[in-house]
Amino acid sequence: MKLTERQKEIIEIVKQNEPITSQEIAERLGLTRAALRPDLSILTMAKILDAKPRVGYYFVKEPGAVGKLEKLLEMKIEDLQSHPVVVQESSSVYNAIVTLFLEDVGTLFVSDKEGYLVGVVSRKDLLKVTIGEADIQKLPVSVVMSRMPNIIVTKPEETFYTALRKLVDYKVDALPVVVEEEVNGQTRLKVVGRFSKTTLANVLASHLSEL
Amino acid sequence: MKLTERQKEIIEIVKQNEPITSQEIAERLGLTRAALRPDLSILTMAKILDAKPRVGYYFVKEPGAVGKLEKLLEMKIEDLQSHPVVVQESSSVYNAIVTLFLEDVGTLFVSDKEGYLVGVVSRKDLLKVTIGEADIQKLPVSVVMSRMPNIIVTKPEETFYTALRKLVDYKVDALPVVVEEEVNGQTRLKVVGRFSKTTLANVLASHLSEL
């Protein structure tokens, strides 16, 4: 929402003198109340100012707060993503668990030798195998992971909103951020980032604290 | 942002006829362009309509979208929380893991015999113990949990924004929603809900899809 110079002036006057009547604001600006009315209604409708009957106008919040929150929804994943943690499909389950703790993430992405995405392994996948009989030092992580093409991914050019919807609709904790590469006529995916529910919470909180 | 009847009418006209000039809108409403101007500037400043020079007005988005997003931040946890999953401190680690899978949650809250909160156990806590030498069928969950008073909690009357900040600032995946009770002169906490990063993502997504 783009404010005029006069609207900005009105906000400053209210900030410093609240509560203040429209008559008093008009006097300070050398205007009639009638001339002031359209600006005051815009500012109260936008909830930048609030009016209490017989008391006057109050300052509610900085203009721009709303726009910023909306802008977040349209921001690109490439500007929001976290660092991805990738293990090779031949890694043992034990190694995957150690990596998960060392890197302090909830989800690992699994790649083949060429570095292309082949699967995703969550804390739940790992927990399920550790309570079984398997020898987790020997069992490769590829046996317990969710496997391509049943992996929900996002892309650097997708928006915050799209990624949020995927996390929720597919009930996953994290999405690999991928770019497509053509290899021998096949489309393979390279992992370039991570967008998890933790990333989501962090991005939202830091965005809101800047308002 | 509360719209007048005339502003709502203008929005409908633009929606169905975009692009449409202010002259055409004025004619449909039986008004002069001058009389229409204040409403049109409010609607474009609120980014509900957009104007392209020499083309006319376009519809951009539903009014209310912005206000709703802001309102979410101030909503109370009691209106947003998920169902809590609680195990007793005497439960085995094995039982806790089974509960976690059956209930499909990432974090369990742990209570004493009287039902008061004594700890929280995460997937990571459980994963850590399962790769050790312990007999998880016998080991009580109280040995591996995070313990009161080192538990970050939220309350039914706290806001979405406060809970979001706690999840992020304390790096936890879930908060127990608690109410205080006085027991023999001591303040104890009863768990009445759960607010996790998954709750957060779900609430945000469903809120946005209603816009």
Image: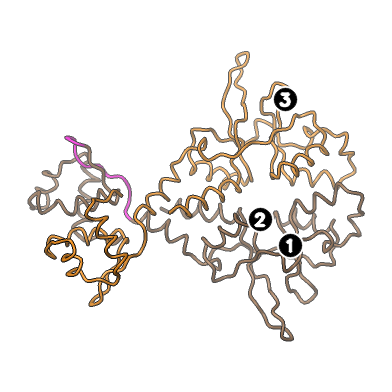
Chain colours: A brown, B orange
Q: Which chain carries label 3?
A: B
Q: Name the residue under label 3.
A: B112
Q: Mark 1 points at which residue?
A: A120
Q: Are marks 1 and 2 in contact (CB under 8 Å)?
A: yes
Residue displayed at 76% across by 61% down: A146
Residue A147 placement, left or right of B27: right
Q: Which chain carries label 1?
A: A
User: What segment carries the magenta color?
Assistant: A53-63
Q: Which of B92 and A83 is in front in this view?
A: B92
Question: Amino acid type of disc 3?
Answer: Asp
Q: Which of A113 and A209 is in front in this view?
A: A113
Locate residue A153, reporting x and y percent. 64, 66
Question: Amino acid type of disc 2?
Answer: Val
Judging from the image, what secondary structure is the residue with disc 2 in?
loop
Relative to B20, residue A65 above or below: above
Q: Which chain carries label 2?
A: A
Relative to B49, residue B3 above or below: above
